[in-house]
Image (spheres, grey):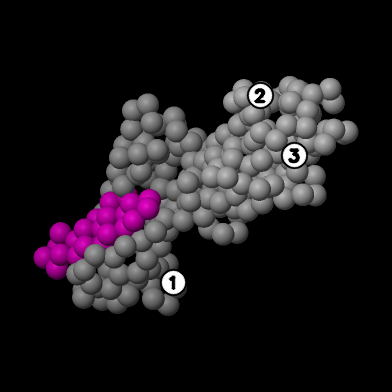
C-alpha cells in the first residue's frame, strides 16, 4: 500500500508499489488534539482547535491542474486522520494540507511533491503556522509582584489599560511576553518611541514620571508575513 504521513511539523511520504492507492496520514501535534489537550489553542489569533477543527487535502498535477481534493476531514480530538485516494497516473504531483478551526479560519498550511511511481524515499514537510498571537503578557515590578489588565488578558484582545500602580522610577519593572506558537517571534517592543531592552523573555520598563506610558508589541508569525500588534498603557505609582 502506498502510504503518506503528514505531521503538522513534519511530513513523511512513503510509497509501496504493490498498491493502487495512496493514503495520506495527517498526524496532529499534541497541543492540537487528545483529551484535555483538545481545548488547546493554536495558529491565527490562538483560535481553538476543539469542536470542529478539520483538514483539507488538495492534490495538483505538475502543471498545477487540480487532480484530487478531499472533503473536510474532521480532527475530532484524534492524534491523526487518514485520507486514501486512487493512485494517480505516472507523473509528479503537489499535495497540500490546510488546517482550519471550527469557524473556517486557516490555521496552518503545508505542501510537498511526490512522483508516481518512482518516489520511494521519505519526504519531510514543515507545516508553517500563521499564528501571530501572544498567549500571555506578564507585567511585574522589581519585587516580582504581577499586575492585572483591564480587560483581562486574552490572545484575541489587542488593547489594554493597566490600572494597577507600579513602583515609581523603578529599574526592576519588567514585561514578559509569551507567544502562542513557539515559532512566532517578537518583532519589536516599544515604550512610547523607545525600543525596550530584553534579557531572555523579559523586557525592562523605564519610568520617569509624568503621563502614562504606552507599550506597543508587534508579533510576527512563523510564515514571516502575518503580524499582530498589542498595545496597552502602564501607569507608574501616582500616575493612574
Mark 3 or mark 1, whichever is nearer to me? 3
Give the mark nearer the N terminus: 1 vs 2: 1
Give the secondary structure at mark 3.
Answer: loop
Which residue is located at x 49 percent, y 45 percent? 181
In front here: 89 or 212? 212
| The quarter of the displayed image where residue 133 is located | top right
Mark 2 or mark 3, whichever is nearer to me? 3
The residue that label 1 is drawn on is: 65
The residue that label 3 is drawn on is: 206
The residue that label 2 is drawn on is: 147
Give the secondary structure at mark 1.
Answer: loop
Give the secondary structure at mark 2.
Answer: strand
What percent of the width, then of the height, locates residue 90? Answer: 26, 76
Quadrant in which the C terminus appears: top right
Separation of disc 3 and disc 1 at Cα?
57 Å
Q: Residue furthest right?
A: 210
Mark 1 or mark 2, whichever is nearer to me? 2
Please give the label number shown on residue 149. Answer: none
Q: Is residue 187 left or right of residue 62?
A: right
Amino acid at each position: 500500500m502506498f502510504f503518506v504521513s503528514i505531521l503538522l511539523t513534519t511530513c513523511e511520504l512513503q510509497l509501496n508499489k504493490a498498491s493502487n492507492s495512496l493514503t495520506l496520514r495527517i498526524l496532529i501535534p499534541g497541543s492540537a488534539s487528545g483529551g484535555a489537550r483538545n481545548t488547546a489553542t493554536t495558529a491565527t489569533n490562538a483560535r481553538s482547535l476543539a469542536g470542529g477543527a478539520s483538514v483539507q487535502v488538495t492534490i495538483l498535477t505538475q502543471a498545477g491542474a487540480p487532480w484530487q481534493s478531499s472533503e473536510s476531514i474532521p480532527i475530532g480530538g484524534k492524534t491523526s486522520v487518514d485520507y486514501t485516494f486512487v493512485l494517480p497516473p505516472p507523473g509528479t504531483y503537489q499535495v497540500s494540507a490546510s488546517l482550519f478551526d471550527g469557524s473556517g479560519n486557516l490555521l496552518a498550511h503545508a505542501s510537498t511533491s511526490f512522483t508516481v511511481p518512482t518516489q520511494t524515499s521519505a519526504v519531510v514537510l514543515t507545516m508553517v503556522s500563521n499564528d501571530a498571537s501572544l498567549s500571555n503578557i506578564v507585567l511585574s515590578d522589581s519585587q516580582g509582584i504581577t499586575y492585572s489588565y483591564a480587560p483581562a488578558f486574552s490572545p484575541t484582545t489587542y488593547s489594554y489599560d493597566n490600572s494597577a500602580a507600579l513602583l515609581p522610577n523603578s529599574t526592576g519593572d519588567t514585561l514578559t511576553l509569551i507567544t502562542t506558537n513557539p515559532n512566532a517571534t517578537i518583532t519589536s517592543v516599544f515604550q512610547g518611541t523607545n525600543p525596550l531592552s530584553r534579557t531572555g523573555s523579559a523586557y525592562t520598563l523605564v519610568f520617569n514620571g509624568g503621563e502614562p506610558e504606552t507599550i506597543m508589541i508587534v508579533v510576527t508569525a512563523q510564515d514571516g508575513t502575518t503580524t499582530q500588534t498589542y498595545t496597552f498603557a502602564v501607569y507608574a505609582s501616582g500616575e493612574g
